[in-house]
Amino acid sequence: MVALPADFDFFDLFDIGGLYVSDNPTATPERGLPQHHPVPINYYLKSAHNFYYPSPLEKHIHSSKVYGLPSPLKLKRSDNMGKKFQQMTASHQSFIKQQKLFFAATATADSRINLSPKGIDTLRIINENRVLWLNLTGSANETAAHLLEDERMTLMFCSFEGSPLILRLYGQAKTIHPWEAEWEPLVSQFPPLPGTRQIIDMQVDLVHSSCGMGVPFFDYAGERDQLLNWAEKKGEQGILDYQLEKNSLSLDNKPTGIAPPSK
């Protein structure tokens, strides 16, 4: 059990950190930290005067064990609470690579706003300001249609396990098709997947982190295989035919550019 100094405020904590204490109102510095109603805390405390200072935990927790956590505890400050960055930091990139799911949002000035969940092994970080994602064939092709008119795109990543975090990438993107010169060197970044349709190449100009405390926990149980099995059964020509029939226009009847140029 860890005793905290008298100025420790259990009700003025914010952000995250990976260390869990109690929100039980009977908790006092003299009684230590009872193991009830765990809530995440950051390594900062918010004072009554609305300024921030290092948590006493940084000074008072050294080699003690807190609820079975390993000793000693090495604490580091979190940058997750409403911060802006001009590029992805190493910690951002590590977080993104751990996620099994992300969301892509696009729109034009007069279209519906599209928001798509993306899974499977389809995302690559090229550098601090560039990401690629492999767009597989599906029933709609909204992203490609929107990017022809408006290059803005947002990618969002959420933590569904461990410490909470939401990370958004903002920037401009373009669609690359298999017949374009850029295709071959970029598609080699990904495993060969049936139904591959396009590569979305995004230049990131803003990274924004937020707390993610309202996102529930979910356990990852594995990837669905229906989409890849469906594309495999259709075969290469079947997929091309499907794309021309189903993917040529958006929901707002905007062209998607899916058809190869006429020779």
Image (cartoon, grey):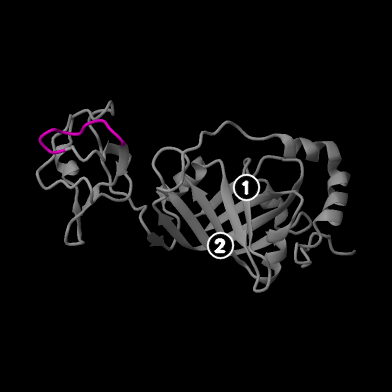
Q: Is residue 33 magenta?
A: yes
Please, is residue 62 above or below residue 77 in the view?
Answer: above
Q: Quadrant of residue 145?
A: bottom right
Q: Position of residue 258 (x, y in %)?
A: 79, 59
Q: Give x and y (percent) for residue 223.
A: 63, 35
Residue that mark 2 sits on: 203
Give the vertical position of 42 relative to 209 (above or below): above
User: Which quadrant, please, contains the N terminus?
Assistant: top left
- The secondary element bearing badge 2 is classed as strand
Amino acid type shown at disc 2: Gln
- Looking at the image, the residue that sits furthest to the top is 68
Residue at 73% from the left image edge and 40% from the top image edge: 227
- Among the two numbered marks 2 and 1 on one chain, the one whose residue lies closer to the N terminus: 1
Q: Nearer the viewer, residue 22 or 77?
A: 22
In the rendered structure, which segment of residues is drawn in magenta?
A: 28-37
Residue, far front: 26
Q: Which residue is mark 1?
A: 118
